[in-house]
Image (cartoon, coloured by chain):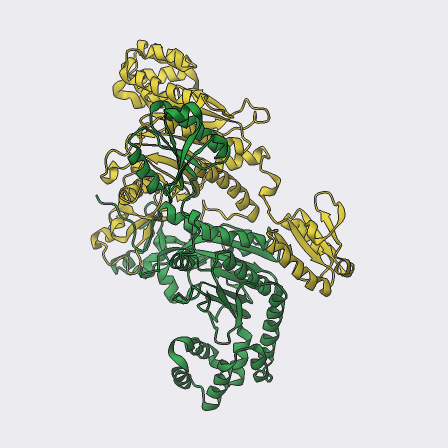
Chain colours: A green, B yellow
Amino acid sequence: MKPSIPKGTRDFLPAEVRRRDYIFEIIRKHFRRFGYQPIETPVMENLTTLTGKYGEEGDKLLFKVLNNGDFLGKANSEDLAAKDSNKVLSSISKRGLRYDLTVPFARYVVMHQNELAFPFKRYAIMPVWRADRPQKGRYQEFYQCDADVVGADSLLYEAELTQLLDAVFHELGLKAVIRLNNRKILAGLADIAGMADNMMDMTITIDKLDKIGWDKVAEELATRGADAGAIQVIKQFLDAKDLATVAPLLAESSVGRQGIAELQEVFDLVASQPIHNRIEFDVTLARGLNYYTGCIYEVAVDTTAPGQEKIKMGSIAGGGRYADLTSIFGMRDMPGVGISFGAERIYDVLEELNAFPADAAEDLQYLLLCLDDEALAHGFGLVSRLRARGVHADLYPKTTKLQKMMKYADQRGVPKVLIIGSEEVKTGNYSLKTMATGEQEKVQEKDL
Amino acid sequence: MKPSIPKGTRDFLPAEVRRRDYIFEIIRKHFRRFGYQPIETPVMENLTTLTGKYGEEGDKLLFKVLNNGDFLGKANSEDLAAKDSNKVLSSISKRGLRYDLTVPFARYVVMHQNELAFPFKRYAIMPVWRADRPQKGRYQEFYQCDADVVGADSLLYEAELTQLLDAVFHELGLKAVIRLNNRKILAGLADIAGMADNMMDMTITIDKLDKIGWDKVAEELATRGADAGAIQVIKQFLDAKDLATVAPLLAESSVGRQGIAELQEVFDLVASQPIHNRIEFDVTLARGLNYYTGCIYEVAVDTTAPGQEKIKMGSIAGGGRYADLTSIFGMRDMPGVGISFGAERIYDVLEELNAFPADAAEDLQYLLLCLDDEALAHGFGLVSRLRARGVHADLYPKTTKLQKMMKYADQRGVPKVLIIGSEEVKTGNYSLKTMATGEQEKVQEKDL
């Protein structure tokens, strides 16, 4: 039998795990530094928790776990005879794999509300599962990296999360452009364009500007009920490059004015501190409008930065404010704001830019190669002492041809090997070879 | 709707996640230091990979994932009509959740054999799923922490893994007793007691010595086919406290002599280096004999150590050598040796001993509380600068009664709060309060 793994899932080799961990660790470090706390929820959730939260399409993409034991026992015979999968489902499966980190977080906040201090700042870096058709860069099992603060509506958090995005990409050595908008500005635009009733249509169309250009957008707006005046107002908007230009256009809309004021405050707070990446207002930024109610973020690779011009990649992080996280589970008044890093895309970008540090792939510092049995016994003592001192060291477990051992060292990706023969055992002067250069020097135990 | 999670699964609060991570991080640190490399495999494996690998009982305890879409489409109508869950299963489910880390590792080695350098040393710290009846301390979703080296039969690895067990428990501040035996010694005992054909029966009975005492063990051995002579030989064995006493008893068994020699070499290697815990030979140690073929380990809390006398807990780590990891997947000659830490049990022991470091539960260093709006603006700047310097700091996001903010600080478990009012903004001399003692002092930004 030739073994395989499910389509859309992956095995990771050690060097890949280490490079993925390099990204996760930087994200985690800044989450912690900013006061976000780790929580964990089970991989399996009750289907009552998951179903209906991601739309009809989402329900189909949920992985469902079969009940254990005689799972058909409780199924309806007629439904079985009709092979009606939908009807049979609820009687044979009551659990599913989590589809994102947000719905489990909402459930968690409701269940543990009396154990949490609000504002509650949490992060989670965990895999999720979706039965999407697998394709390049899209997997059925992948990680999400989320930070959210709930139970507070202070704009300080919008500013802080902007700083957090900035800090992470700075430490990753990636120049990013962090785009901000506010859902209330879009609502204001819909107001004054007379499209308040089909704001969603309007925003979905505007969101395509980058891809299809203004003429097509204008056409589509017309088919979605915008008259000539509305289209002109929208055009003015989309041409605006800063808040100061947009503000007068929204003078007549109270929600619009509020959006401007909120975003201005966030920009002012962010501007009051040093920042490493470009922060931009983008009136065309929409994201998932059902959910977000205030500030929204989207981060992309800054293709104007030297060396990054050729990167073609969509958003690598995003987020926003929502008025209500938990009412789907019966708990009201739980506003929040959060961000999410697209770690898998960030991985691809860093790889393309060759921007992983050299030691991200292998953290072994020394491999000891021994030329005879006496040297091997000596090597065991040496490697034991090195490890006790915190050095990452390994010992080739037998004596064989040096060439074979060097090949192993090469495959392991270890930067330096220590060669030990009878002379070295006697004198304690070891031959240290740097793999990258072939350079060889004499060292003693204390030098390692 | 009142939300819930599946029975046998858990949510973790931030302090619990941090304390669990404290354990995982120490284990991971030593895995890496000893040259073990991280790999990751998917949570979902094909059922063809999992089924039949854990016995009939194990097959029942596998969580199976329902095929997506119209899963009943391919099911046999007669089997459905008969509600024959077993027969229907294979047509509606082709994936399951991993049950342990060993079978996925074997599959991984076979699939990636051309990408790996042997000896291949890997570790994995990942959850597994079993549909066991949930009970105190037993969950359906729990972590395993495994390190294995495959593709080598050197006893240096047995010694190294003993050192690794020693290093981890030492750093956890837990005195442990590491018991060793060798499957070949048990085979030798079966040889000379004339029980080679029912060695498994013999070992299972011996394994109960601790629980039921010698008289019951002797009775049970008799019912399992041991004659008076055999029982006397076994008694002599079980009374032996060291290898030197056992060795002459096995003089006539070649496999027995080999086991003695192997174990002696491991003890000699381990004894050649400093060690922090008790290392003992235990001839009654058996573990899963089907699988192991050489050295076996089991670690328990050392109840002779001061302060640990009252701990009642079974094994907290274990492992052993196997002759063959991968032939279930068609690849021969892949011997190895590995260990596994029982992180969930270690957690319970550390909690009972109150042995978690104080800062394992919360890593926020400072919480800033601001008494008016000007102070809040100042606080945002200060918290931003502290974070940029790598300090873990947070800011209460609005001004309210100090008492309310102090209550929040208390709930967050933060060690120190910084109180900022108009005076502090003017002078830059902040009031720093230590939560545990109530002590208050004046500090400046550079002191934090």
Regarding residue B250, the answer to whether it shows in the image is yes
| Corner quadrant of residue A131 | bottom left
> In this rendering, would A23 be left or right of B428?
left
Count of all numbered marks drawn on residues in the image: 0
Q: Seen from this angle, which residue lies furthest right? A: B423
Residue B140, percent across and down?
42, 43
Q: Residue at x 28, y 11 (%)?
A: B252
Rendered view: B35 above or below A346: above
> In this rendering, would A249 be left or right of A437?
right
Rendered view: A325 above or below A65: below
| Corner quadrant of residue B146 | top left
Q: Seen from this angle, which residue lies furthest bottom? A: A228
Regarding residue A333, the answer to whether it shows in the image is no
**In front of the other: B409 or B231:** B409
**In front of the other: B216 or A158:** A158
Q: Residue at x 56, y 27 (%)?
A: B308
**In front of the other: A410 or A251:** A410
Residue A342, percent across and down?
44, 60
**In front of the other: B139 or A423:** A423
Rendered view: B320 above or below B78: above
Residue A365, percent across and down?
43, 39
Residue A345, percent across and down?
41, 60
